Amino acid sequence: MSLRDRNVIVEGLVREYRDALTRFFVRRTSDAAEAEELTNELFFRLIRRLNRQPVENPQAFLFHAAANLVNDRHRRLKSRQMYVASNPDAKGDGIEDISPERVLEGKQALQAVMRLLDGVDTRTRDVFLLHRVHGMKYAEIANAYGISVSSVEKYIMKCLVQIAKHSGDKA
């Protein structure tokens, strides 16, 4: 499958299923911002998967992966709650020890993503980095830039498509 074919498939799936998947996540998380993030993570996983191998039924992949994302989220929350309950000194702030190797891996991964984003405008790249690197929620980014959450979603999707294009060249 060509890179162009993959991009057409992903863009079509985004148009067709984005709203339904976001509603699916909202029902399971009760958090619209998290639902948006999970939806984007889902499409990002699809792009990575398509870069490695073809997917026979992309729609089935999306909904199966969506269920897995929700299950993973619940397991993480449960594990975190159990840890905090069993460790009274733990604040549950999510801080973990970071080895020098993890720091190096993170820097290299960020440099690779920055190279992949060379083809997008500054605002689009900044919005993507605020979300993916700095962990800001869509609503926070929208507030900071004075734009709609929908615009934030579009900027992030534009970056994901750019990443898919470039990583597809190397796959």
Image (tube, helix red, strand yellow):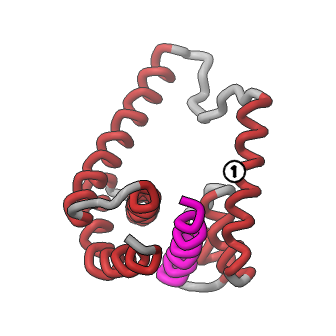
Tell me if 103 is positioned left or right of 113 in this view: right
Q: Which residue is mark 1?
A: 109
Looking at the picture, how far across and down is residue 19, in whole percent?
30, 75
- Count numbered badges in the picture: 1
161 inside magenta stretch: yes
Left or right of 157, for residue 65: left
> Which of the image's four quarters has the N terminus?
bottom left
Q: Quadrant of residue 57?
A: bottom left
Q: Judge left or right: residue 42 versus residue 134.
A: left
Name the chief secondary structure element in magenta. Answer: helix
Segment colored magenta: 149-171
Which picture quadrant has residue 32? bottom left
Residue at the image position 51 percent from the left and 81 percent from the top: 154
Rendered view: 104 above or below 66: above
Please give the name of the residue rendered at 71% of the width and 44% of the height, measured from the top-left corner.
106
Q: Callout 1, which amino acid? A: Ala
Camera-nearest residue between 63 and 20 = 63
Residue 104 seen in this snapshot: yes
The image position of residue 20, as x and y in percent, is 24, 71
Give coordinates of residue 89: x percent, y percent: 62, 17
